[in-house]
Image (cartoon, grey):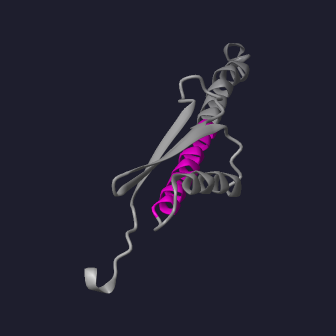
Amino acid sequence: MSRTDRGEASAQTVVVVPVVLLVLWLAIQATVFLHGANVASAAASEGAAVAARYGSSTGAGERAIQRTLTALGSTASGSWVVQKSGSTVVAKVNLQLPRIIPFFPLTVTRSAYESVEAFMTEDER
């Protein structure tokens, strides 16, 4: 080893370790965001499907969202609403996510749309 190479490994480590940690934190934050988006999407879909059933209500859809979030083990806080307008049900779920990296979004919002089931007799078809 020549005299000019002394300390080169230390300098490389000082440069590489922060980059590796940043990539690791980015991967963790992306995973948290994508998992939160999947959980919000599943909860919204379930809430809209329950509220769209014949004779069901928006309250039943909101309870279905709560049950789905609990069943999926979501610890994220958030809000949700189910609305019926005409023959369409819309369920919107907004979850607050933990943040590791400053520029990632803090919330994820997903919506689901379903048509309201209608009872028809055989003669009405």
Q: Is residue 50 magenta?
A: yes
Residue 35 to residue 102: above or below: below
| Side of 41 relative to 23 (left or right) | left
Image x and y of residue 101, in percent: 61, 27
Front residue of 109/118: it is: 118
Residue 123 to residue 74: above or below: below
Q: Residue furthest top?
A: 4
- Residue at 60 percent of width and 44 percent of height: 31
- Please state the total of marks drawn on the protein image: 0
Front residue of 27/74: it is: 74
Q: Is residue 13 magenta?
A: no
- Residue at 60 percent of width and 57 percent of height: 64
Q: Quadrant of the N terminus?
A: top right
Instruction: Point out the stretch of residues depicted in magenta.
Output: 28-52
Q: Is residue 125 visible?
A: no
Q: Is residue 16 visible?
A: yes
Residue 125 found in image quarter: bottom left
Image x and y of residue 49, in percent: 48, 62
- Residue at 34 percent of width and 82 percent of height: 121
Q: Main secondary structure of the magenta part?
A: helix
Residue 75 to residue 21: above or below: below
Image x and y of residue 56, in percent: 51, 62
Image x and y of residue 89, in percent: 41, 54
